[in-house]
């Protein structure tokens, strides 16, 4: 007998028929001998509807009240699923964040989990009842409802799995696993049977939408095996686990891309200590995350430097005023912005032990006539900033160039 956490996203509970399908899955797992905890998201589109209602009342809603409103989406899903399980002949009880007690900090709309009290879940399971927990929500030390941010139900599921010592956390979604890249962009993309926490974390941070970043961080920290699979069939999906030798043999596991990047070019700064620190210190103070950074120095009568960096498009709107202010203060002559860019990345544990991977990536892009505007690297990834119009061409070229396509893999297996 295993202790299993199953998480179902908004699409999986998007209608009454789909909720009934989830109920049957949960009951089947229990009949198989498992203790089952189900985490649910709000029904597809429900959170957006609730947020829209709030903005119709007031232009800038209070964050605390926004969490009270947004959390109701998961509350409805949990209760409906519990009813559906009853209707299918099973036993279930819906539990909300404050009942489980998922204790968070007080950062409304983007709270972080501090502790989870598992006793309520264990007492429910002991009675042979399926515990249906509302995802995305918690409660702070003052008893106020909090939410965990977009994709927060993934975080809820993995955190609950870690807290109760679950044998596995199954993330059911509308795709049947993690792919080598987005199949909508590259039809030859293939499902990855197994991937390391580190690779999944990089892919999630670089634009892959399958798992929320914080959920992968928690899974890696506590060693929770995560199984990403489809809620519409019984096929095996992708296991996200700790690394081993077989995973290190794969040089490149996947290609990710992110169209939500913007490039900022701060022109002609004085090249002296403290100038760049002032610029990026101001961004940090405003809670703006910066990705790629390039500094180039021009020699002359007085040395000047240009600084280029990238940040999320959503952050650019609010960051522009203080970027302009700081740039003027530190002597910049001009600030240029470019939103027609895309970050394309390759990820793989094997990069640690294989030389020349970055050079190969650059050659592949050059062969396609794609200019690289910026580069960033880590032990297991290389990212290039390119013009957005080349996104699909770059993804396909890199996917094929590193031998990730279905056709090449199938040929290699036959050989």
Image (cartoon, rainbow, N blue to C red):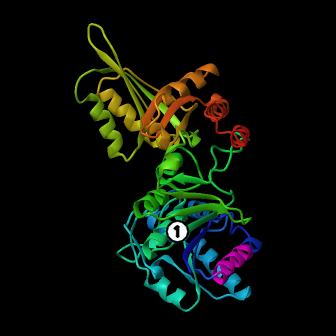
Looking at the rendering, which quadrant does residue 255 occupy? top right
Q: Nearer the viewer, residue 220 or 68?
A: 220
- In magenta segment, residue 253: no
Instruction: Decide: is 108 above or below 319.
Output: below
**Which percent across, then down, holds residue 106?**
37, 66
What residue is rendered at 65% in x and 61% in y?
229
Looking at the rendering, which quadrant does residue 184 occupy? top right
Q: Which residues are magenta?
A: 19-32
Give the crowd class for mark 1: few <14, some 14-19, many >=20 residues within 10 Å. many
Q: Quadrant of the N terminus?
A: bottom right
Instruction: Decide: is 304 above or below 321.
Output: above
In the picture as drawn, the residue positioned furthest to the top comes out as: 301
Residue bearing mark 1: 157
Dominant secondary structure of the magenta stretch?
helix
Instruction: Decide: is 183 above or below 54.
Output: above
In the picture as drawn, the residue positioned furthest to the right comes out as: 17
User: Can residue 80 be seen in this snapshot?
Assistant: no
**Which percent across, then down, holds residue 266?**
40, 26
In the picture as drawn, the residue positioned furthest to the front comes out as: 415
**Which percent across, then down, holds residue 361?**
55, 28
């Amino acid at each position: 007998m295993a202790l299993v956490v199953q998480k179902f996203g908004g699409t999986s509970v998007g209608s009454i028929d789909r909720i009934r399908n989830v109920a049957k899955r949960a009951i089947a797992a229990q009949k198989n001998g498992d203790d089952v905890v189900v985490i649910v998201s709000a029904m597809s589109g429900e959170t957006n509807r609730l947020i829209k209602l709030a903005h119709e009342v007031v232009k800038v809603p209070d964050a605390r009240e926004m969490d009270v409103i947004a959390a109701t989406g998961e509350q409805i899903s949990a209760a409906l699923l519990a009813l559906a399980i009853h209707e299918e002949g099973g036993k279930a009880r819906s539990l909300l964040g404050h009942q489980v007690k998922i204790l968070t900090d007080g950062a409304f709309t983007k709270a972080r989990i501090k502790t989870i009290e598992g006793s309520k879940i264990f007492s429910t399971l002991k009675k042979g009842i399926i515990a249906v927990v509302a995802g995305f929500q918690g409660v702070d030390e003052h008893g106020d409802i909090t939410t965990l941010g977009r994709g927060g139900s993934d975080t809820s599921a993995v955190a609950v799995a870690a807290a109760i010592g679950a044998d596995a956390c199954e993330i059911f979604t509308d795709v049947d696993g993690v792919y080598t890249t987005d199949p909508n962009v590259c039809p030859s993309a293939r499902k990855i049977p197994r991937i390391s926490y580190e690779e999944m974390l990089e892919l999630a941070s670089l634009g892959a939408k399958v798992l929320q970043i914080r959920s992968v961080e928690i899974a890696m920290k506590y060693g929770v095996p995560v199984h990403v699979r489809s809620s519409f069939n019984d096929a095996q999906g992708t296991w996200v686990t700790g690394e081993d030798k077989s995973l290190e043999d794969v040089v490149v596991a996947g290609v990710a891309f992110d169209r939500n990047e913007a490039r900022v070019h701060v022109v002609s700064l004085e090249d002296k200590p403290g100038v760049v620190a002032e610029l990026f210190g101001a961004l940090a103070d405003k809670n703006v995350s910066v990705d790629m950074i390039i500094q180039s120095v021009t020699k002359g009568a007085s040395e000047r430097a240009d600084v280029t960096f990238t940040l999320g498009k959503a952050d650019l709107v609010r960051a522009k005023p203080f970027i302009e202010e700081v740039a003027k203060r530190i002597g910049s002559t001009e600030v240029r912005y470019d939103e027609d860019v895309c970050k394309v990345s390759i990820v793989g544990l094997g990069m640690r032990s294989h030389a020349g991977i970055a050079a190969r990536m650059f050659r592949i892009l050059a062969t396609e006539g794609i200019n690289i505007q910026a580069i960033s690297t880590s032990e297991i990834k290389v990212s290039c900033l390119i013009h957005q119009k080349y996104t699909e061409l770059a993804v396909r070229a890199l996917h094929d160039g590193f031998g990730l396509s279905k056709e090449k893999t199938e040929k290699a297996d036959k050989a």
